[in-house]
Structures are given as structure tokens and as C-alpha cells.
Amino acid sequence: MELLILVLHVIAALGIIGLVLLQHGKGADVGAAFGSGASGSLFGSSGSTNFLSRATAILALVFFLTSMSLTWFSTKKTGDSGVMAAPSAPSKSVPSDIPTPSVPAGPADDGSKSGSVPK
């Protein structure tokens, strides 16, 4: 299910990119006034603007919904409640039957060290 939503998400993203690139900017209306032939388009004089705007809005809605769905799936998969979730405790415990290393005893402190400071 998650893979299907991911594929739909990528298709919606590519569709939005394509539709935005197909649309005319605000400055394109000035060129149409001087005979660029906008009335001879496939959708009529104003039909292409309405169709492309609606298709972009629909794909934007699909993109938003698939983004929310993928977010929901990712939180259900990991079980985290967010970025600031507390770290989990380590699963292994240190065994208590490990012997502690013994430290060899140093020379007896009788005050006759050669490096000691005189009083």
C-alpha cells in the first residue's frame, strides 16, 4: 500500500511540474493582444487556462494527500512519536559474573622514596 502511494506521489509531483511549465505567465496576456493566436488553441480562448488551473489544483490536492499518507505510514512503521522522542534503553545488560581485573599492589609507602619532597 505504501509503495502504491509513493508511486502516486511521484506521478503527482511530475504532473504538477509539467502543468506549471505549460501554463502562461501573467505577462503572456499582453502578447495575446497582438495576435499570438490564443483563440485557436485546443481548449478555446479561455478554456486552456481554466483546464490547466483546475488540473494543477487537483494534482496539488493529490500531492498533499499522498504526502500526509506517507507521513502517517512512516510514523506507524517506526513507532516514534516525533523528532524529540526519548531514546530507548539498551536491550543488552552487562552480565554480573565478569570478574573485575585486579590491580597489582605497588611498593610499600615507607616514606623513603627518592622522588618525594622533603618536609
Image: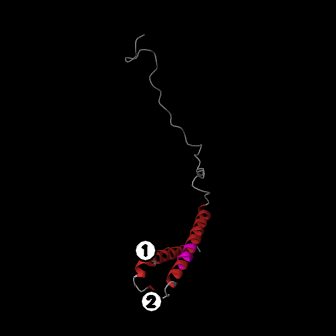
Residue under pointer 1:
27
Q: Say what amino acid the circle numbered 2 marks.
A: Gly
Label for residue 63?
none
Count neighbours of disc 2 (C-alpha within 10 A) and say few if under 14, some if 14 to 19, many if 20 or more.
few
Position in image of residue 56 (x %, y %): 53, 76
Lower sequence index among marks 2 and 1: 1
| Residue drawn at (57%, 55%) of the image | 83
Circle 1: residue type: Gly
What residue span does the magenta drawing correspond to? 55-61
Residue 64's spot in the image, x, y percent?
57, 70
Q: Residue furthest left?
A: 114
Which SS class for mark 2? Answer: helix
| Residue 10 or residue 118, whichever sits in front | 10
Report the residue marked by disc 2: 40
Q: Is residue 51 magenta?
A: no
In the image, residue 42 lies at what x, y percent?
A: 47, 89
**Quarter where residue 35 is shown:** bottom left
Q: Quadrant of residue 78?
A: bottom right
For residue 101, above or below residue 6: above
As helix, strand or loop, the secondary structure at mark 1 comes to: loop
Q: Main SS type for the magenta part?
A: helix
Q: Residues within 10 Å of mark 1 (few under 14, many from 20)?
A: few
